[in-house]
Amino acid sequence: MSTQTRIPVLDLSPQVDALWPELNHAIQKVLRGTHFILGPEVKAFEEEAARYLGARHAVACNSGTDALVIALRALGIGPGHEVITTPFTFFATAEAISHVGARPVFVDIDPESMNLDPLLVEKAVTARTRAILPVHLFGRACDMAELGDIAKRHGLKVVEDCAQSFGARYRGKQTGTMGHVGCYSFFPSKNLGAYGDGGLMATDDDALADTLRMLRAHGSRRKYHNETLGYNSRLDEVQAAVLRVKLPHLEAWNRGRRRVAENYRRLLDGHPGFVTPRVVEGHVFHQYTLQLRPGDRAQVQARLEEEGVDTMIYYPVPCHRLKVYQESHADTRCPVAEAMAERVLSLPIWPEMDEESQVTVAHALLQRPPHR
């Protein structure tokens, strides 16, 4: 085990240490240039991100949440419309739908992938449905072929929530490039994280990209010539500079996360007390999330805490059971998501995590002594 007293859920210090000279130079360059908003670093990062993703356009913004809101607005989603999405996600996914005046329609998840169940999505389409908003949860891509077919049959837009899946692939394609808009978050804990908030929208549609850029800057294409109500949602130059330093390392970091996931699977697979996530093609393991037996989680989490292992629960309450939606979605039933909310537990994972730390986590989980 490393010299850390505890094993955290995420340790960003190896990346900071390894990239310190480049990060320091990049940040100082911005400070000395005194151009802090929508300057050359943002422009360069947008071009590099678009190239990496294989998209025609990448439009940077202030956060992953803003990316979702702006994407929905740009696609004309608003009051009286419905957007089908998952209840097993961070609140921002549903919040964005509500913020544009539409109604989130929560559809249950597949118990193995914990992503949207396409069979249930089609059953939820109504005359008011305008879009599907899938979430590539924990870094694993949704079944985009099925969801894409459903969208085409019913004339729906597709907005991909890629907050946890930058660099993940589905049948060789980057998540976020299979729908109308892909929305990404650069919250510091993400696979590609800034040192503050940040977000991105990717699209191949020229006109849509123009609208996205307009909406992020107060609804104006030219300064002081506002065309509609927009947002103050611009990525800072400092954050763009940081992301430019980090982007070339993303593939290696995602390979590191898969290596950690494969080690966990080797150490833990087959134990009757929990189900480990599958290491499928393209999965980038933003989280490594177990499914525990019903009623076991509190005890397991407490035991790991006592052994110096930090864990997290993503997510303890499905969106349709949150207070904000309790009244409006009182009749919504998503039994798989509700069961997962009581069973999931995420273990420590980061690209540079050493095997000794993983063995310590596994032994604490399996109630074995650290050295046998």
Image (tube, rainbow, N blue to C red):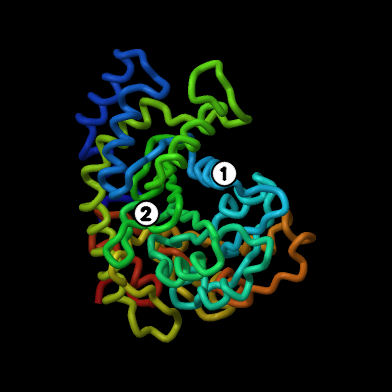
Amino acid tagged 2: Thr
Residue 112 seen anywhere in this rendered image of the structure: yes
Looking at the picture, tell me which residue is in the foreground, 238 or 126.
126
Residue 107 pos. (x, y %): 60, 69
Q: Residue 2's x, y, as percent?
A: 26, 54
Identify which residue is drawn at 55% across, 60% down: 156
Label 1 or label 2, whichever comes before in sequence order: 1
Three-letter amino acid code at the position of disc 1: Val
Image height of 203 relative to 81, above or below = above
Which residue in the structure is indicated by mark 1? 69
The image's mark for residue 177 is 2
- Going 50% across and 76% down the picture, which residue do you hit? 110
Q: Residues within 10 Å of mark 1 (few under 14, many from 20)?
A: many
Placement of 78 over or under 231, stated as above or below? below
Near mark 2 (Cα within 10 A), the count class, few <14, some 14-19 or many ≥20, is many
SS class, disc 1: helix
The answer to which of 97 and 364 lies nearer the viewer is 97
Q: Position of residue 163 (x, y in %)?
A: 44, 51
Examine the rendered structure and indicate whether residue 80 appears above or below residue 150.
Answer: above
Q: Is residue 63 above or below residue 133?
A: above
Q: Nearer the viewer, mark 1 or mark 2?
A: 2
Q: Residue 130, how many percent across, how many down?
A: 60, 58
Residue at x 29%, y 64% (from the top left corner):
282
Picture quarter with the C terminus: bottom left
* Front in this rendered view, residue 38 or 349: 38
Left or right: residue 243 compared with residue 201: left
